[in-house]
Image (tube, rainbow, N blue to C red):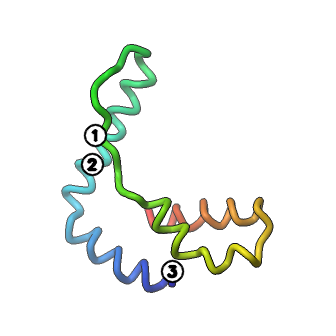
Amino acid sequence: RITALLNLAYPQMFKHEGALRGALQVSLQQWAKERQSSEYTEKRFIRGHRKEILLKVIEPLKAHYPQEMWDKVIKAFSLIYG
């Protein structure tokens, strides 16, 4: 399932790299403004459902690992997936 996800996602990421870089830049700018001022009220740009997608893909493994290990697996795959 993970290989299938990466085989599907990476070509799309490369195809839309410019838009994804723009979205990342907006997200980082908003994060910096929020840290700078507690009065920052501009509507936030919300990214996709990456965490939900990862959870769905590796859900069959959940029964095989304790919660602490499960959290580490999610974080590791999120680094690979992006």
Assess disc 3: are there few (<14), some (14-19) or many (≥20) residues with their C-alpha within 10 Å of its C-alpha. few
The C terminus - image quarter: bottom left
User: Do tag 2 and tag 3 residues touch (Cβ < 8 Å)?
Assistant: no
Q: Earlier in the sequence, mark 1 or mark 3?
A: 3
- Residue 23: assigned label: 2
Residue at the image position 48 percent from the left and 62 percent from the top:
52
Location of mark 3 (residue) = 2
Residue type beneath disc 2? Ala
Name the residue at 55% across, 67% down: 55
Is residue 65 depicted above or below 48 in this figure?
Answer: below
Label 1, on which residue? Answer: 26
Q: How far apart are marks 1 and 2 (CA)?
A: 5 Å
**How far from the left and from the top, in percent, is residue 18?**
19, 57
Q: What residue type is labelled 3?
A: Ile
> Where is residue 16, by image quadrant?
bottom left
Three-letter amino acid code at disc 1? Val
Q: Is the residue marked by circle 2 packed among few (<14), some (14-19), or many (20+) residues within 10 Å?
A: some
Q: Earlier in the sequence, mark 2 or mark 3?
A: 3
What element does badge 2 sit on?
helix
Q: Residue at x 23, y 62 (%)?
A: 17
Q: Work out how far the residue at label 1 is from the one at label 3, CA to CA, in angstroms.
A: 28 Å
Check if mark 1's residue and mark 2's residue have beta carbons within 8 Å: yes
* Residue nearest the viewer, comparing 75 with 56: 56
Is 41 rendered above or below residue 16?
above
Left of 48 or right of it: where is 23?
Answer: left
Q: Is mark 3 on a helix, strand or loop?
A: helix
